[in-house]
Structure formats: structure tokens, C-alpha cells
Amino acid sequence: MLRHYAIRLLVLLTLVAFAAFFLVPIIWLVLAPTKTSEQLVNESPFAFGSVGNFAHAFRTMITWQGGSLRIWLENSAIYCLSGTALAVLAAVPAGYGLAQTRFIGRGTLLWITLVAMIMPANALILPLFLELNAVRLIDTAWSIIVPFAFFPFGVYLAYIYFSAAIPGDLLAAARLDGAGEWHVFRHVALPLSLPIVAFVGFFAFVADWNNFYLPFVMTYDRSQYPIQVGLQLAIVGVPAPDRAMATLIAITPVVILFVLAQRTLVGGLLAGAFSG
Amino acid sequence: MATVTFTDATRLYPKSDRAAVDHLNLEVEDGELLVLVGPSGCGKTTTLRMLAGLEYVNGGAILIDGKDVVGLPPRDRDIAMVFQNYALYPHMTVAQNMSFSLRMAKLPKAQIAERVRAAAKLLELEQYLDRKPRQLSGGQRQRVAMGRAIVREPRVFLMDEPLSNLDAQLRVATRAEIAALQRTLGVTTLYVTHDQVEAMTLGHRVAVMKDGVLQQCDTPRTLYERPRNAFVAGFIGSPPMNLVQGTVDADGVRIGATVIPLAGRPPKPVGETVTVGLRPESLVLASAGNGIPATVSIVEELGAEAFVYAHLADSATSGLNVQRGIIVRLAPHVAPRSGELIHLGVKDRSMLFFDADTGLAIET
């Protein structure tokens, strides 16, 4: 009995330690704009300054450089939503096809997907740049959206989901009911795959939103910057609390999305674990 | 309605050296309910899935109404199937589940509604049409799966252990409903089960399979009375037939120390070994010295009858490599008690003989 409680306590302490590790920077980030530059350096990292400071930092950053932050947020939204939509549109049917059909070269395709998935994304940036430059898309929205649509991790996630979570008999029943492969996917597999659509969509969106290097390489014009690339301009000449505010604004959409999608995401994670 | 013919149909799974279905030759008549039965892994479900087009066919042909369907996609075979786990579309209502095939066939809406309504009425599902499968009981889900097959008005019905997820009472009731429904609709039906009672009660004919090979296909009565081999003899019948080793003697067949007289001609020359098949109801209680001695281990009283599980006494089997457990079906008022020593006689002309090596039945 004592051993049981000791183990539970150990588990609890480990979880608290992990939660603290990830929460502390966010708490610092939320508190930083409430302080002045001097307070930020001299006071405890967890000290609270004033609501007035926070509001001031917000106003400063929203109007900074003629409202650039708003333009970059809008750019980020356009790039990420378009990229995510394309990634989901491609990844979910691709994963389904790989899981449910047998064709020549399937093994090779799976292998390529896996290799593309584990390859560092930055390693592909130079060839991508050359490709997109050849078709004169550099410094346009497409130079970011098109690479965002390439999401092998999503293909692999969907492949795992369709291999394990959809009973084969269900698809067989639809085929016997007279449905062709498209209708089997559209009317049976897809309605049952909403958790994986949400899952792939969320991962794609977060990866796209936080991507700095790709848009940094693909865009020259400041008006084309997404928020992550724009933020670097705030490194010089902007007081630290205001810079923290800019960062806070930059991460807020992802936090909101996670809170809204949390339930579906956990459902997606567990979908393969239980049958029936 | 249609006939179904398997001609040397074979399924060999990749990386396996033994065929899951081995040169199957079987003919299902128009309107017949044919039951495929056998132990798990015997190839019965694979056979069904080959006919459905869900399983690759490595060799031979499968004909529906004389036309080879091997290579046709499932949707072009005009076959409806009831799956063991029902495979209902969980995101659709009962009505949508039942109408899915008709919507795929682009039938007029009015006709779809009419067919669904008629099937729902037949299966007493009318008040559940708007429910999702998860809101139904096991028995109701089973009926929806049947309904989904019926609305199609297909040429052939396939049923893959459709009763195995139901409790015992519901299974017996649904079994009778399926039999009645099949008679009403008159659709050629292939029904797979591992339960030989289900096979015997439902099938116009029953095909017994083992290790991918068809053992015998006959009417339930013929299977019971004239099994073609020892496997069929032991598989069909509940409780199963007793199979013991015997030696042909000048006066009959010797089981242990007891000689059972023969009414017909001997199955083999004197001195040779045969497998003797004794149905539980073929055995009777005999007076001491006039039958095979056995010790009762368990008596199951079922009211109308009693099953006596006994062990052949050592004196009857010493030195012989024979099955010692034996089951006897008796009237309850004559059933002995556990631990009692009994003597078992055999009713005239009720013994079956099988070749001790090949297991094939020996005509006498």
C-alpha cells in the first residue's frame, strides 16, 4: 500500500516538474509586458508590474511601424490556413490510399514518406527555393503556401489511423453495397476520420505558424512577412516588455486553437486504441 | 435469385504453403440455404469472402448463374452480406444504413423510402429508423444488418456467423427468424457458422469443411446418419459421436474385452483395426457381463434426457490405445449416479465404421 502511494507521488512529482518546465516561460511571457524595462531586469521574473504597463505595451506594438504586426498576423493566417487546408486535403486521402489499397510501389512510397518525415525540413529549403525561383513564385504567398502543403508527417499519421482505426469489414460492407472506391472514402471512411482530420490539421497549422526559416528565405518584401519573420525586426530598437508583448500576440492564435481543439485532439490520439 | 458454383476454387495466402481453401467444388441451388460449417481456420469464411469478391482467388472459378465472377469487383456481383460484427455504418441512422446501397444505385427517393419501410416492417425496426447503431441493442443491430441486406433484393445473401454476438436465448429466436425470412424471400443464401447445431437447424444442406478442404455436403439427416469420414462423424451431432478403436472379430467387433455382435457384414477382414462410431443415443445400459464396462464420471440431467459422461474401465481398454471417454444419452429415470460402474450395450445396426488410417467411412 505504502509502495503504491510512493509510486503515485513520484508520478505526480514528475508530471508537476514537466508542467512547470513548459509553463514557466509562458508565465514569464505573460508577466513581462506588465513591467517596465527596469523592473524586468531588476525584479523577480514572476513579479507583476501593472495592468497599465500591459495595456501600454499592447497599444505600442499594435501601432508599431504603422500597424505592421496586424499585417503580419493576417499574412500568417492566410499562409497557415491555406497551407493547412491543402496539407489536410492531400494527407488524409493519401494516408487512406496507402492504408487501404495494395498497388505496385506502395512500399516504396511509404518508405519515401517516412524518410521525408524524418528529414530536417530546413535541409529542403535550398532546393525548394531553387524550384520556386524557377517558376517565379519567390516573394509571393505561393512560395510559402505550396511548401506548407507538403506535409509527410500528416500522410503518415493518416496512414496509421486508417490502418488501425477503421474496421476493414466496414469498408467491405460499403463495397458490397455498391459503392466505388471514391464513395467508400467519401461516405464511410471520411465521416469516421474527423479526429484524424483535426489532428493532422492542428499539427500542420502549428508547424506552419511557428515556421520562421522557410518564409524568411522565400520573402524579401516586409509586407509579405508572416508574424514569425516580422518579429525579428522587433529585436532591435524595441524595449524588452514591448517585445514580449509582440511575442505574446504571436503565440495567442495557436494557444486559442489548442484550447478549442483539445478535446478532438485527445479523441484523435486515442481513436486507434479502442475498437467498437 | 441465382445458383452459385465453386469449381476448384482455391485461395492460397501469400507466404503460406497450405491453401486456406483448397480446390473447392460446391454447387448451391437456386433459393437454397446452404450452411458452411467447420472448426475455426477451416476456410469457411474465406470461401464466403471469395464469393463476395473481398478475397483474391488464386485458382478455379466461382460462378453466379453460370457466369464467372472472379475478377469482378464486389459492387458488381449483386451480393449482400451480413457480417459477424454487423459492420453497420456508425455515423448513419438505421434508415441511412439500410438505404445506403439503394442510394449508391441512385434509385428514386420514393422507391428507396418504400423499400426501407417494407424491410423495417418485416424486421420490426420501424420505431428505430432514426437511431444510430450505438443506440441499439445487439439483437436490433443484427436485424439492421439483415435489413441492409434485404433492401438490396440481391441475387445471393452471404451471412458470416451473424448470430455469434447474441446471447443464447436471442440466438435461438433469431435463428428461427432467419430461417423463416429466407423461406419467405427465397434468396439463395450461403451461411457460415462454427456451430453445428445452427448448421443442422438452418441448412437445407450443410457443407462441412476442415483445413480448407470440403469434407461432405449433404442434408443434415444424411450428414448425421451417413457421415463420409470420422471428422464429419465427430463434428456433427451434439453431444458428438463417440469414436473408439475396435478390432474385427469372428463374432463381431471387439472393443476392449467386449465383443459387440454385428447385424451386417464385417467392415474389414478378421483381425484388422477399425474406428467404431457410436452415437450417444446408440448406447444402452446392459446387464453386467453383457456390455462394455465403464465408470460414470459426470451425469448431466436436462429434464427430458440425461447425458452420462463415463470412462471405459481399465479392463476394457488395457493395452489398447483408445479414446476412453464416452458419452451416453439416456432417459433421465434410468441414468446412473457418478462413480457407478455401468455396462454399455449397442443398439442393433447403429454402429458406424471408419478406416483406422484414412478415417473414411466403411460401408457395411
Image (cartoon, coloured by chain):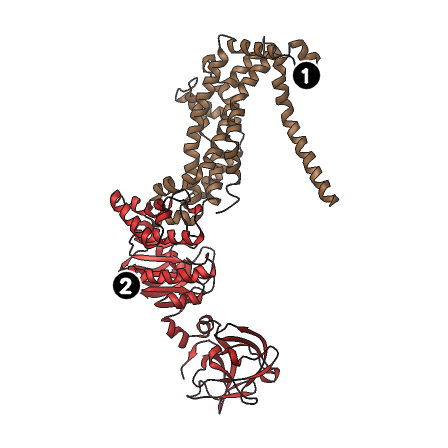
Chain colours: A brown, B red
Image x and y of residue B144, in percent: 38, 51
**A247 up-or-down from B179: above or below:** above
Q: For the residue labelled by badge 1, is the local secondary structure a helix, a strand or a loop?
A: loop
Q: How many marks?
A: 2
Residue A214 - label? none
**B354 up-or-down from A274: above or below:** below
The CA span between labels 1 and 2 is 86 Å
Q: Quadrant of residue A187?
A: top left
Image x and y of residue A16, in percent: 67, 31
Q: For the residue labelled by badge 2, is the local secondary structure a helix, a strand or a loop?
A: loop
The three-letter amino acid code for the residue at tag 2 is Asp
The subunit letter for the residue under badge 2 reads B
The three-letter amino acid code for the residue at tag 1 is Ala
Which residue occupies the extreme bottom position in the image? B250
Instruction: Choose between B155 and B173: the one closer to the eye.
Output: B173
Image x and y of residue B275, in percent: 49, 79
Disc 1 packing (10 Å; few <14; some 14–19; many ≥20): some
Is mark 1 in CB contact (under 8 Å) with mark 2? no
Give the left or right position of residue A245, taking residue A105 as reference.
right
Identify the residue at horizontal 49%, vertical 37% (top origin): A157
Q: Which residue is mark 1?
A: A47
Q: Which residue is mark 2?
A: B30
Disc 2 packing (10 Å; few <14; some 14–19; many ≥20): some
The subunit letter for the residue under badge 1 reads A
Q: Nearer the viewer, mark 1 or mark 2?
A: 1
Instruction: Choose between B153 and B23: the one closer to the eye.
Output: B153
Q: Is residue B11 visible?
A: no
